[in-house]
Every structure is written in C-alpha cells, then in structure tokens.
Amino acid sequence: MTSDATVVEVVFALPTTQTVVRLELEAGVTVREAIERSGLLDRYPGIDIDRHDVGIWGRKVKLDTPLASGDRVELYRPLEVDPKEARRLRVRR
C-alpha cells in the first residue's frame, strides 16, 4: 500500500448475508467511485445508489463525499415496513 492510498470497505447486507469488499484506492476517491469499483452493483443489480441512501459508519452521506482511509461505506436497503407500523403489528399480536 502506498502512502497516497485510501483503504476502505464497501458493505451491503441482506437479511441472511453480508458482503464486505475491501478496496485500496487512490486518495480523494468519493463514495460513488468506491461503490462502483467494489463490484457490488454488478453482483446485486437491484441496488440503485441514486435512489437509496448510503452512509459511512452509520451516518448518511452524499455520493460525492470524499473518503478517508478506514471508512466503511454502507449501502442501505429501503425499509419494507415502517418501524412505527411494525410496532403496532407486534402489539396487536
């Protein structure tokens, strides 16, 4: 690894699996570039980074956010059920 390299992880999780891709990229790379280079968009064609949220370590960010070494880029899936509605359904049961 060179001193100008940025080492990041790009993560996508499904209910039963989690995929983590570790990348060594040049300094100044953005969230969008890391996601595109991770191969996750090819592996999971249902991911639409222009419509769904992304984050770094649990904090939502924009796709043009520059990355620092050690960042964990997370691709968020849309909620299937609103959390408030899920609580109401559990209470009824």
Image (tube, rainbow, N blue to C red):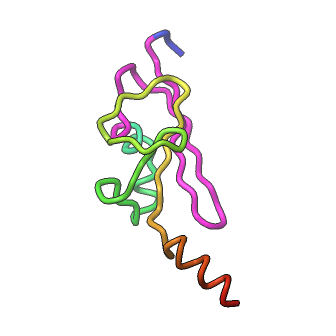
- Image quadrant of residue 30? top left
Q: Nearer the viewer, residue 42 or 56?
A: 56
Does the magenta stretch mainly form a helix, a strand or a loop?
A: strand
Q: Is residue 19 magenta?
A: yes
Residue 10 on image: x %, y %: 51, 42
Is the C terminus in the top left, top right, bottom left or bottom right quadrant? bottom right
Is 85 rendered above or below residue 70? Answer: below
Is the N terminus in the top left, top right, bottom left or bottom right quadrant? top right
Residue 4 on image: x %, y %: 43, 12
- Image quadrant of residue 51? bottom left
Residue 11 on image: x %, y %: 54, 47
Instruction: Name the residue located 52 percent from the left edge and 26 percent from the top edge.
Output: 7
Is 32 rendered above or below residue 92? Answer: above
Q: Nearer the viewer, residue 34 or 78?
A: 78
Is 61 rendered above or below residue 68? Answer: below
Instruction: Name the residue located 53 percent from the left edge and 37 percent from the top edge.
Output: 72
Residue sitting farthest toward the right: 93
Residue 15 on image: x %, y %: 62, 67
- Image quadrant of residue 88? bottom right
Q: Is residue 63 magenta?
A: no
Q: Which residues are magenta?
A: 4-33
Give the side of residue 87 with respect to residue 56, left or right.
Answer: right
